[in-house]
Amino acid sequence: MRKLILPYLSFSFFLMINIVFWTYSKNVQMVWANVPQAPSEFKATTSFLGDRQMAYRAYAYILQNMGSVDGKVLSLREYNYESLRGWFFLEHALDPKSDIAPALAAYYYGSTKDEEDLKYIIDYLKVVGQSPEGQKWRWLGHAVYLARHQVNDNDLALELAYLLADNKSPSLASWAKQMPVFVLKGRGDNALAYKIMLNILISNVDTMHPNEIFYMKDYICNTLLPTIKGEQRPPFCDDIQ
Amino acid sequence: MMVFSLVKYVLTAAFRDKILIAFVVLAAVGVSLSMFLGSSAMSEKDQFSAVFAAGTLRIGSFVTLILFVIFYIRKSFETRDVEYMLSRPVSRLQFLTAHSLSFSLLAFLLAVITTSVIFSMPGPQNMEGNLLWGLSLFVELVLVSNVALFFSVVLSSSVVATLATIAFYTLSRMIGGILGIIAAEPEGGAMLVLQKIMLLISMIIPRFDLMGQSAWLIYGAQDSINWPFILSQGLVFYGLVFTASYVDFKRKQF
């Protein structure tokens, strides 16, 4: 029994030391150093042993949870959006087909009320929205929404709306082609908006759904024309109440 | 005939080591974790799960295989099993061929388990891409198991042989990026010498970065990478590493 006294004593001593150390360490929390700079494409891919898709998904997961660790949830105001833009462009380089990174940018990080921060998101959505993959043009549509309604920059919204309307995707929706009209209307350029809308109607009347044609006629006759002085009402307005 | 007896002997040792059971358990844990992580993604949950599971199982199968190969071969040397077998009517070439074949069969089993698990996961998966990924994983595992065989014959320490195999695997997966940098940014002076050295090294390093891409599981295979490319690279490099092992084994004095 005597032989065990020293081992027991030393074990008890180190147990006590551990408990003393714990009283200090339990209150030490990791300090979040904000969004780090995005790595280069090479470093990002190499970190996942050359598997670009694995790197893309892992970084998307990190982006989704960034800042919300250790039970903390940060306000979007606290994020460095300039660095975030770098991460989103890295994601775009790793996988231009997936929609998870644009969705995070548009619906999560795009919820910030800071107009300067939103411009970084719009920068990214502008590039993604011009990708010919699938229905990526929808992200450009979201960029127009952010520019017009959140940043209140109608010039930027119009520039993006023209890019959207020029998209050659066969899946491009009618509302996307008409987007410059809505932005011009918002700017007060009603005459130009009317001309563009009329032109779209005339050019596509043979291919569009009757509901869409009716909507465009209604928009021209009841929304645009009442705001333009001296413009002659086209004959189809007689059918629209 | 002797070769097949040896293959049976090695495979029996592998099953006794319970590597298949251990790998199935590892696969179950890896897939469960991947599905858990994937389910917490904002969207494309199934794609996240498939990619995470594919990455985890690829590394898991690689580690399982090389640990078995290296520790089995080193133990055979240390317990003088190799000398005993070579005292029987077995040539050194037969001995090496049997071991290479056995490890390749194990690679096949691990690749089949992994591919089946990934394919059975929920979500829209690409059949052609999945099969190509499975073939690619099989070729990758055959190559790394034979590299592990080479290092365990050449090096006398199991730990050093394991580290060397891991280093080789890492370099093989990075070499594409390194070659890309060399091609995009030609440098002068000392960097030029380093670039030339890397180019020389890349001649005897397989392009694993072009193989087993998780993106194939979701979007299908790329046009530039197809099964003839994967099999050709496998055959070319297999020949190199097998003959290198043979040269060293032939020179060994017991």
Image (tube, coloured by chain):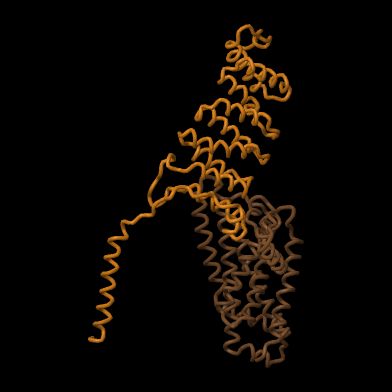
Say if A214 sits above or below A112 in the image. above
Q: Which quarter of the figure is the C terminus of chain B placed in?
A: bottom right
Q: Is residue B155 left or right of residue B3?
A: left
- Residue that sits furthest to the bottom in the current view: B87
Decide if residue A157 is in sight here: yes
Image colour for chain A is: orange
Horizontal and vertical percent for residue A174?
65, 27
Image colour for chain B is: brown
Decide if residue B131 is in sight here: no
Horizontal and vertical percent for residue B109?
63, 69
Residue B148, by quadrant, is bottom right
- Residue that sits furthest to the front in the current view: B189
In depth, the one of A180 and B72 nearer the eye is A180
Horizontal and vertical percent for residue A187?
56, 20
Say if B111 sits above or below A158 in the image. below
Q: How many marks?
A: 0
In depth, the one of B110 and B58 nearer the eye is B58
Say if A93 sits above or below B190 in the image. above
Q: At 69% from the left edge and 76% from the top edge, which residue is drawn?
A: B101
Q: Which quarter of the figure is the N terminus of chain B placed in?
A: bottom right
Horizontal and vertical percent for residue B93?
73, 84
Residue B10, by quadrant, is bottom right
Q: Is residue B63 left or right of residue A6?
A: right
Q: At 50% from the left edge and 58% from the top edge, which residue is drawn?
A: B33
